[in-house]
Structures are given as structure tokens and as C-alpha cells.
Image: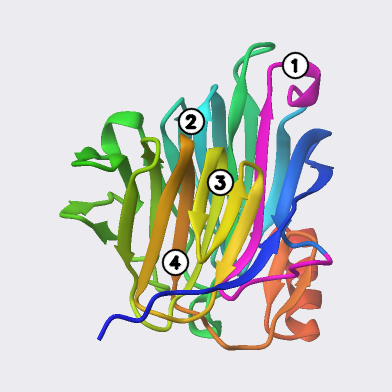
């Protein structure tokens, strides 16, 4: 029997900056929502002013989790010390598994004009935290898009929904990551694997879910259930949806490292300083 998901929390983002001064709106990784297992952080960025993003994210390390960037508009170049090079373009994405350690940079390839998108941090279980680093570079053409009858346009970055399978593969938390642009007043029922942590972030228009109207710029987390029922607002609505298996392990985090214990965090710093990444 179908069990509809209900709202757990509605989160307004916190204005902050990261990297070399890139202006962001952070929804996960704040005092209101420190983490949402396995999700550690969600940042939305969007500006037409080059000064808000031109500093980019110069070379920096990571260990123990995955970083995901989904670019709605703009261009950003990825480099890392494993030898990967990628160009993030409008509609493209990258999924980087830092594992035991990687040093990378993400730098704008534009000085003005709109740059808009999301960056997400996803935890790894203890058994995978020291795995070999991996980088999945997805061009816009790699991400399938499908018109869902009487609903709108669906893009799937990871997972499977409505006969569409995303290109990201072999992720231990079994994520679903979609971008759904709904036409005005249309409704959709999205099946979710029972037990998965699920949230949406509305970034255009509005949606109606669980008797609440959610406007653009808000994140919503949900209680357990196997179906998420969403209706678009009078001018339509667009959102990203993420669902993944929780890890249920202790979290120790400091700066760019996320491990299970403080001892492991200290080791990460020692390894980085000693050039062992």
C-alpha cells in the first residue's frame, strides 16, 4: 500500500561564501540542518556578477566523501592531482569520489554573465572512505531528458525514474538525483525507495506538497514513505530531488575532510601536509 511522504523540515538557506569568495546559499550544513544522512552539504550559487564567483575554488584537498556539482548555467573547469580534467558546462555535472584523498580545483571560465548551479557533499561509509579516488565528468548530452506527459521535463543525473536512467553509476549510497521542471498546476507522484533520505530544493516558481506551498529558494526534507506527491504552482515549478541510503555512522568533519573519528581527521591533515594525497 502506498505511503505518501510528509514534510519533516522546511529550510531557508544561509547566505555565505566559500572557495575564494564565491557567494552561495547553503541549505544543508547550517545550524538549522547540520546534515541529512548521507547528505553533508548543499550549496546553491547563482549570479550574473563576475565578482560573486570569479575567485572560484582554487586547489584544495578532500578525503572521505563525494562532491557533486550540477551546472545550470555557466562554465567551470575542473583539475585534480589524479590527472582528471573536465569542463562543467550549462546542463552538465561532475561526480567526484574523493575517497582516500584528492586535490582539485574548480575555476570559472567566464568573467561575467550568469553562473548558476548546485554543489552537494555526500558522505561515504567507513568501508569506502579510503577507496581509490574517482571522477565522473558528465557533459550536457550525457544527461538524459524526457518529457513526462501532463507533467513537464525530467532530467536524471543518477538513479532511475520513469524509464529514465542517469549516467552516474556505482555510487554506494544508491542515489536518485533528478531535475524536474513542472508545468503550471500539474501533479506528479514520484516513487522513492523506502528508507532513503529524501529532499527537494525548489529553485524556480513554486510547488505544493503535503498541504504546504514551497517557494523558490527553499529546501524540504521528508519523513519516510514510498511516494512523494508534488503539484506545481500557478506559474510552474522546478526543483532538484535527491534521495539516497543513509549511512548511520558517526561523523567527524573538519574543513575538507569527513571521517568517522577525530583521530582519522588528524591523520588526514598529517597525510595532506606530508604530500601523501
Q: CB under 8 Å between callouts 4 and 2?
A: no
First-in-chain label (4 vs 1): 1
Per the image, the residue denoted by label 3 is: 202
Q: Is residue 2 above or below residue 99?
A: below
Q: Which residues are magenta?
A: 31-54
Image quarter where the C terminus lies is: bottom right
Mark on residue 49?
1
Q: Is residue 43 magenta?
A: yes
Per the image, the residue denoted by label 4 is: 243
How many callouts does the rendering have? 4
The residue positioned farthest toward the left in the image shown: 163
Mark on residue 124?
none
Residue at mark 4 to residue at mark 2: CA–CA distance: 23 Å
First-in-chain label (4 vs 2): 2
Residue at mark 3 to residue at mark 1: CA–CA distance: 22 Å
Per the image, the residue denoted by label 2 is: 88
Q: Position of residue 69 (x, y in %)?
A: 53, 44
Q: Position of residue 193 (x, y in %)?
A: 33, 76
Amino acid at each position: 500500500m502506498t505511503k505518501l511522504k510528509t514534510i519533516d523540515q522546511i529550510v531557508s538557506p544561509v547566505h555565505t561564501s566559500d572557495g575564494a569568495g564565491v557567494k552561495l546559499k547553503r541549505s544543508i550544513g547550517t545550524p538549522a540542518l547540520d546534515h541529512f544522512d548521507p547528505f553533508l552539504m548543499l550549496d546553491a550559487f547563482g549570479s550574473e556578477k563576475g565578482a560573486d564567483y570569479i575567485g572560484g575554488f582554487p586547489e584544495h584537498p578532500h578525503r572521505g566523501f563525494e562532491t557533486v556539482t550540477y551546472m545550470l548555467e555557466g562554465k567551470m573547469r575542473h583539475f585534480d592531482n589524479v590527472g582528471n580534467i573536465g569542463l562543467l558546462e550549462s546542463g552538465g555535472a561532475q561526480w567526484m569520489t574523493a575517497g582516500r584523498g584528492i586535490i582539485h580545483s574548480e575555476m570559472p571560465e567566464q568573467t561575467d554573465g550568469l553562473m548558476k548551479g548546485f554543489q552537494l557533499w555526500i558522505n561515504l561509509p567507513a568501508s569506502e572512505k579510503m577507496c581509490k579516488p574517482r571522477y565522473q565528468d558528465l557533459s550536457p548530452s550525457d544527461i538524459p531528458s524526457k518529457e513526462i506527459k501532463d507533467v513537464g521535463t525530467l532530467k536524471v543525473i543518477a538513479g532511475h525514474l520513469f524509464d529514465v536512467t542517469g549516467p552516474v553509476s556505482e555510487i554506494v549510497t544508491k542515489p536518485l538525483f533528478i531535475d524536474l521542471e513542472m508545468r503550471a498546476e500539474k501533479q506528479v507522484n514520484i516513487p522513492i525507495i523506502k528508507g532513503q533520505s529524501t529532499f527537494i530544493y525548489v529553485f524556480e516558481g513554486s510547488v505544493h506538497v503535503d498541504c504546504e506551498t514551497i517557494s523558490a529558494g527553499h529546501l524540504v526534507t521528508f519523513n519516510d514513505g514510498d511516494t512523494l506527491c508534488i503539484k506545481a504552482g500557478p506559474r510552474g515549478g522546478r526543483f532538484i530531488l535527491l534521495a539516497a541510503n543513509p549511512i548511520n555512522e558517526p561523523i567527524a568533519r573538519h574543513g575538507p575532510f569527513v571521517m568517522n573519528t577525530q583521530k582519522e581527521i588528524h591523520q588526514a591533515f598529517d597525510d595532506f601536509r606530508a604530500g601523501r594525497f
